[in-house]
Amino acid sequence: MREAAEDLEKHAPKGISIGHIAPDFTLPNATGEHISFSRELEKGPVILTFYRGAWCPYCNLEHKAYQELLP
């Protein structure tokens, strides 16, 4: 079991660390408009979150918390 976990860790893709800038990308937003990461960074700090869907209670809690923080 331990060997499998070590093997997985060795071969798993690595993410970026806090403070590092992600590579540029363009994705559709909730309304289908294509949003460029670099363009958004020009406006200020960016929070990128992944919303799996309405079926996910954790995503919904996170989404609600962000909505409460927005002006």
Image (cartoon, rainbow, N blue to C red):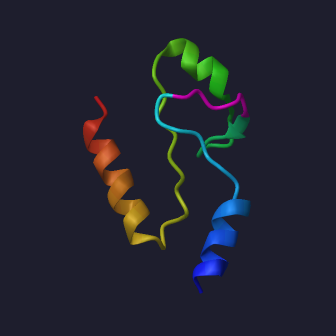
Of helix, strand and loop, which mostly describes the magenta segment? loop
Q: Quadrant of residue 45?
A: top left
> Can you give x and y, in whole percent of width and height, for residue 1 in the image?
59, 86
Q: Quadrant of residue 33?
A: top right
Query: Is 60 rendered above or below residue 35?
Result: below
Query: Is 20 rendered above or below residue 10?
Result: above
> Can you give x and y, in whole percent of width and height, for residue 9 in the image?
63, 64
Q: How many marks?
A: 0
| Residue closest to the far bottom | 1
| Residue closest to the far front | 3
Confirm whether the magenta stretch covers residue 31. no
Q: Nearer the viewer, residue 4 or 59?
A: 4
Q: Residue at x 27, y 37 (%)?
A: 69
Q: Residue at x 58, y 40 (%)?
A: 16
Is residue 20 toward the left or the right of residue 57 in the image?
right
Q: Which residues are magenta?
A: 20-25
> Can you give x and y, in whole percent of width and height, for residue 37 in the image?
64, 27
State which quarter of the image contains the C terminus.
Answer: top left
Q: Residue at x 39, y 61 (%)?
A: 60
Is residue 67 toward the left or the right of residue 20 in the image?
left
> Can you give x and y, in whole percent of width and height, for residue 41 in the image?
56, 19
Query: Is 1 rendered above or below residue 26?
Result: below
Is residue 48 toward the left or the right of residue 38 in the image?
left
